[in-house]
Amino acid sequence: MRIERKGQRSMQPTMSSTGRFYRPELDVIRFLAFLFVFLFHALPRYGDLSLYRLPTGFASLYSAFVAACAFGLCLFFTLSAFLICELLLREGEAIGTVNVKQFYIRRVLRIWPLYYLVLAIGVFVAFLSGNLHRSLEDFAWFAIFMSAWHCSLHGWIKSPVAALWSISVEEQFYLIVPWIVKFFNRMSLYGFCAAIFLAANAELYYFGRVKVNGLRVWADSLVLFECFAAGILLCLVLRSRVPRIAHWQRLVLIAFCGVSWTVASHGLHCGFTLASENPGSWALIGGYALVSLGCVLLLLAFLGVQPRLLPRWTIYLGRISFGLYVYHGLALSFTHHLVIDRLNIVGIQIFSLKVFLAAGLSIGLPFGLTVLIATLSYRYFETPFLKMKKRHAVIESQPIVGAG
């Protein structure tokens, strides 16, 4: 594996005077990140496997896979940092500075309309279920993008929109990154990444010493900032160029990503999201380092893949991945409460039929519903805001589906 030098293969082969940066393989990574998170929430847990009488030896590997799927969220963060840093660096080269005001306008137009719409749906669902009076404080923290800290201290809220907690981590990152890129040179950005790594690992060491609940560690913003630092670091190392990698090398990188995530979730007993126990300081530090490493390896494995090799449907689903992410909890809740809970799948005697129905109803049905809702939302709700966002772009990135 080697990095193409200046004058050879740029990270943006279609870069023109219009200041455009778009790589479709990044959309595929977005879709994979969502898919991992969706599977983590949709797949049955270890205790449910006995209901389907699956082999005991399979259960351990299965549980490790389910736990590793949670790291799709970290992949989202790493990709976001990589892309935002790349766009801001290109903006600085194009106009001599970073227009922080325009950056925030773009982020608000992309995130806030859909975020607050889904949050309002969550409030409405809580009202229908009679739990609104117990959930108002939780939703207030979500409304001001402090839900990660709130969940870290008080646990997850019981709502189909609970996954929105991670958006607050992203918003907190946005408070910092444009100023850092605006006033720091590349060498200083390396120092910024090192400072984030040191701060995150110092906190992990402290959490391990005092045996903080593992779920609280997972929702801590500073800990998750390690993923953002990894994305920025990859952007700095590549210097707007893509690695020239053979297909077999890409497969090796993907395999190493899988190993890193599996070791983090199972081998080091870093069950961040499946268990409440704390595995200790060094296990936490090593586990999160492996998670970040896996995210970087997966990004490297896809960067530079020819668009003709990428299925178009994965690119499209990557473009609407924000909607997929924020709606999938609602789709899962709907299918479970109105479909799955009303059927006695476990009581079916034919094993193959039981597994087929369980997979179709618990995974296929909510996935299809999520895609349908996100597609309609993108077309009829998000697109007007995306068009406004496009008018504030200095470096154009992801095109709008269906727009001219």
Image (cartoon, rainbow, N blue to C red):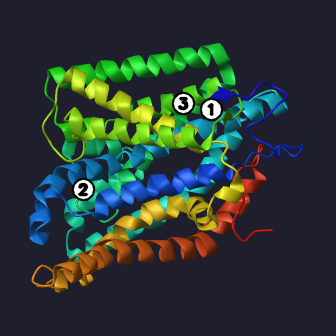
Measuring 69% from the left and 38% from the top, which residue is drawn there?
Answer: 87
Residue with the mark numbered 1: 178
Residue 119 appears in the rendering: yes
Measuring 13% from the left and 64% from the top, which residue is drawn there?
Answer: 48
Q: Earlier in the sequence, mark 2 or mark 3?
A: 2
| Up-down relation of residue 271 to residue 128 (above or below) | above
Expressed as whole percent of the image width and height from the top left, the position of residue 31 reads: 51, 57
Lateral position of residue 33 relative to residue 80, left or right: left
Q: Which mark is residue 157?
A: 2
Looking at the rendering, in which quadrant would you find the N terminus? top right
* Cα–Cα span, label 2 and label 3: 27 Å
Amino acid type at image mark 2:
Ile
Q: Which mark is residue 279?
A: none
Residue with the mark numbered 3: 176
Amino acid type at image mark 1:
Pro
* Cα–Cα span, label 1 and label 3: 6 Å
Expressed as whole percent of the image width and height from the top left, the position of residue 376 reads: 56, 76
